[in-house]
Structure formats: structure tokens, C-alpha cells
Amino acid sequence: MKKGWEEKKLGEVCRFINGRAYSKNELLVNGKYTVLRVGNFFTNNNWYYSDLELEDDKYCDNGDLLYAWSASFGPRIWTGNKVIYHYHIWKVVPNSDIISKQFLFQLLEWDTEAIKKAHGTGTTMMHVGKGDIEKRLVPLPPLPEQQQIVSILDEAFAAIDQAKENLQRNLQNAKDLFQSELNNIFTNKGEGWLEKKLGEVTTKIGSGATPRGGSESYKTEGISLVRSMNVHDGYFKEKNLAFIDDKQAKELSNVTLEENDVLLNITGASVARCCVMPKDFLPARVNQHVSVVRPTKGVIDPYFLNLLLTSKFYKEQLLETGEQGATRQAITKAQLQDFVINYPTFKEQQKIVQQLDTLSTETKNLENIYQQKLNNIEELKKSILEKAFRGELTNKVVQS
């Protein structure tokens, strides 16, 4: 350890104060105080509220240091109005005589992954015990050197955040490039395009069912059963692909899949997601949440139809159709059969598919480049934090 630094237990330099657990009837749609939960701490924008009046230490206010310790991990400086914080969050109160809040925040940020590895428990929802984190040993420089380290980190991370923002903008622009061209093709149709109902240009539209016994009846191998979770816009996701045996498959023989069938989700939150069935997972059937749309050969190219149905112009129409369900988002077979599309000659369809395939490859290459640069920036940030807490950012001993 660097000269002049000490090793202290976290419980010696700060207090970890638990928030409050709630019963369902205590979480309100509206109320005096916002309830900050772990999900809100990171990505969830759905908030609950409370009218409860609690002890002072169960609230946090603008500028307080917090730490999520269950399911998601890590420190945050709260920037907002006074809120009640949930039991799965600690309010971290530093002993200002020996550690600054900003230094403690960066220290906890640096140490989070190590804390998870050393003290994380739980198979379905990992969490860290308060006693474990309080006993954890951390490096502690004198206060003046803490302030110097924070200053160096703030300057470095401001530059990193700006670079990340630029890269994320470039990444989004690369993704938008393909969608922009896709939408342009289907909103500015060329001369000679025909208008037909989907039922007029397909040989099959239909969905299947879940075998008796539900998920308990699925096999570890056999005939693929395609579910909505496997169908994503433009690609088939193998993860969580279910399997059924020959007897179960026979009961679903009316929805036997063929290579180049177009798959369309017709119920639930993923309604209108669409892809082409790859041959690698045949033989296969579909359940009731996925429709098989089999284009007439020589009339509609399946990859063209997939592009058409995932374009903004047609996707919005499908979603609007799905929202007409009485209790949930759903598209019926009759609605699909009556769904009106416009298309050019078969040869022109193939040219459009090739054109968009080339553009897709180019934009994905750009996305990969920008994503790798973002990954590199994250590694750089970790490297700078590592140097900071090894004492390598401040060369001289700073006297207190």
C-alpha cells in the first residue's frame, strides 16, 4: 500500500442505513413521497408513492450517497427531491472527518464487482449482506489526497462521458440509417406496385397451440416448438427454444413449419415482431402466439415480406390492429388475411432485399465498431479507477 495510506473497514469510515420494506397496500399510485426502488435506481421508470411519515433516516434527499445491494449493485448520488428509499438500498453516510463523500462514491464504484464476487449470495436474486460490506477492507488516503484523486477522476471521467455520448450518438445514427432506408422504400412506393390483401398472396396463415401440460411437457430435444420469445424483428432467437416429441408434434401437424416461412407474433407485448424461419431449426411447429405466414412462391419473396412487415409504415398498422383486442394485444387470422400490402414485381423484390442486406451489413459493421469503442472506454474507466486506488494517480504523499 502507498505510504501514508491506511487500510480501514468500510464500517469504520461510513454508516450503511437500510431503507424500508413495503407491503403491497403501502405502495400507492399517488402520494406525498416518491418511493425509490432498486429498479428505479437503474432503468425502471415506473414509480410508486407513499403517504407514510417515517423516521428521518428512511428518506434520502438531493446529493445523498446511495448503494443498491440486491439484484442490481452499485453506488449512486441521488439527484432529485426528497424520497423514501426501499429496503434493498442503503443510504451511505460518510464520516466526514476521515473520508469525503465524493471519494467514497468512487471507491464504492471501483469496488462493486469485487464486492459481488466476494460477498454476493442468492441463486435467483444475488444480494450482499450489510455485515459483509461493513467488514470489507478498503484503502484510505489522507483527506487532502482524497480530494486530489477525486479532482483527477472528475476531469478524466468528464472527458470519458463526453466520448461515450458521442459514440452512443454515432451508434444510434448507424442503427437509424437502416431503418430510414427501409421506411423510405415502403412509404415511397415505385410505379407498378400492386395492392393486395395478405390472404391473396399467401398459401397459409395460421397459428398453433401449446401441448397439453404446458411447459412441463416440453422435451430436452426433438421437434422445435417456436414461441413468441424466439421471434424478433429480422432474426430468430434460439435461446429458450422449446422441443416436443413426435406424438405432440402430430397434434400440431396443421402448423408444420417450412424453410422461409415468415413468423409473426400475434399476441402479447411482442405482437407484430417478425422474422423468417431458418432451416437450421426444422422440423418445427408454432404455438398459439405465433402465426405462420407462407408467401406464394414466385409472387412474394419471404425476405421481402419480412422487411415489409418490420418497416415502420406497416409495423404501425399491425400494432394498431393488435390494439383492437378486447382484453389484450392480439391479431386474428382474419385480420392478417385482410391486411393490405403493396409490392413490386418478384424480381424487384429480390433487388430490394439484396440492397437492404448490403446496407444492413454495412450498418452492423459500424455498430460493432462503435460498440467496441464503447467497451474500450468502459475498460479505460476501470483502469483509471484501479490506478486511483493503488495510489498511482497521485505520485507524492499529500500531507494532511
Image (cartoon, rainbow, N blue to C red):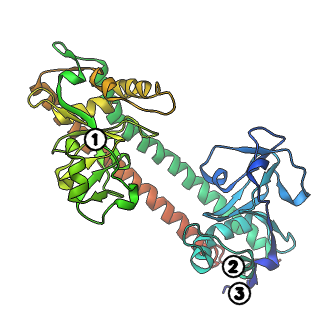
> Pointer 3: what residue?
3
Q: Earlier in the sequence, mark 1 or mark 3?
A: 3
User: In the drawing, does residue 386 fall left or right of residue 332?
Assistant: right
Against 96, is 189 above or below?
Answer: above
Quarter occupied by residue 294: top left
Q: Secondary structure at mark 2?
A: loop
Q: At which x and y percent is residue 323?
A: 47, 27
Q: State the mark number for residue 275.
A: 1
Against 42, is 302 above or below?
Answer: above
User: In the drawing, does residue 68 fall left or right of residue 232?
Assistant: right
> Pointer 2: what residue?
396
User: Of the residues shown, which amino acid type is indicated by label 2?
Assistant: Lys
Against 156, is 104 above or below?
Answer: below
Dot in front, 1 or 2: 1
Q: Secondary structure at mark 1?
A: strand
Image quarter (top left, top right, bottom left or bottom right) of the N terminus: bottom right
User: In the drawing, does residue 98 fall left or right of residue 224?
Assistant: right
Work out how far the residue at label 2 is from the one at label 3, CA to CA, in angstroms: 9 Å
